[in-house]
Image: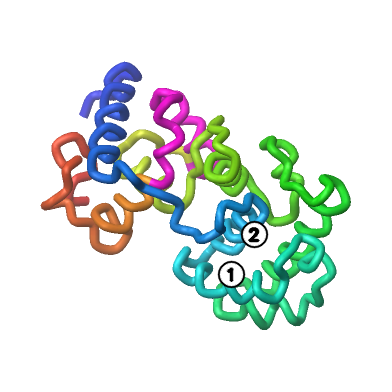
Amino acid sequence: MPRESMKSKRERALVVCERIGEHYPDAQPALDFGGDPFRLTIAVLLSAQTTDAAVNKVTPVLWERYPTVEALASADARDVEKILRPIGFFRVKAGNCIKCAQMVLSEYGGEVPRSYEELQRLPGVGRKTANIVMNAGFGIVEGIAVDTHVFRIAHKLKLSSAKDPSKTEQDLLKLIPQELWGPVNHQWILFGREVCSAKNPKCGECFLADICPSRGK
């Protein structure tokens, strides 16, 4: 099979975004955070290696017990661990939640910073989390959050062959027009859950089948 040109790949990436956008025009973040950037930061931090649904079950309990940055910053790790026990890596996440709150309080006056560089200084926060917080929390779009769904779909569609999420993001940024970066994460997550799932992709009823190099694979 001949190597696809960058021009052709950009055109195909645009069609992918347009079609997914037509099917999921009102896609919203799956995590419940009430519009609070700090709660969003914690929720995304907790979502690593677990489902958004599982996180949405524990965060109401977490915020009832620790309703402010100050309260979480002074929490006992053992108590936070008990709340987070239903999700994966709860001990590490409990520690990161408390350390994150402490840093937001001590270095940023209790307000989550509004830059990628500063966000990624927070314990437990990587590029994906920073992208989601900037996008959904502040309405600032300077990248694409590459979670497991976006990573899988980008590779299925042969839009990237990079081995890690960070490099996959860079590949997508070169292909997708900047004005479409914002919706990609939320829309592709829904597409990944409902159609292009990891275990049982519905290739026979996929609206991208005609432009997907991996159809049926």
* Residue 187 relative to residue 83: left or right: left
Mark 1 to mark 2 CA distance (whole Å): 9 Å
In magenta, the rendered stretch is: 163-186
Residue bearing mark 2: 42
Specify how the rendered protein is coloured: rainbow
Q: What residue appears at the point 31 percent right and 44 percent down from the top-left corner? A: 156
The amino acid beneath tag 2 is Ile
User: Residue 34 appears at what percent x and percent y?
Assistant: 55, 57
Q: What residue appears at the point 70 percent right and 76 percent down from the top-left corner? A: 65
Q: Nearer the viewer, residue 111 or 199?
A: 111
Quadrant of the rendered image containing residue 62? bottom right
Q: Earlier in the sequence, mark 1 or mark 2?
A: 2
| Residue 170 colored in magenta in the image | yes
Q: Nearer the viewer, residue 197 or 80?
A: 80
| Residue lying furthest left | 204
* Residue 93 relative to residue 8: left or right: right
| Residue 198 colored in magenta in the image | no
User: Residue 69 appears at what percent x and percent y?
Assistant: 76, 60
How many numbered marks does the figure carry?
Answer: 2
Q: Nearer the viewer, residue 196 or 42?
A: 42
Numbered badge on residue 120: none
Q: Main secondary structure of the magenta part?
A: helix
User: Residue 94 appears at what percent x and percent y?
Assistant: 71, 70
Q: Is residue 184 above or below residue 175?
A: below
Q: Describe the element under mark 2 as helix, strand or loop.
A: helix
Quadrant of the rendered image containing residue 166? top right
Q: What residue appears at the point 39 percent right and 27 percent down from the top-left corner? A: 176
Residue bearing mark 1: 59
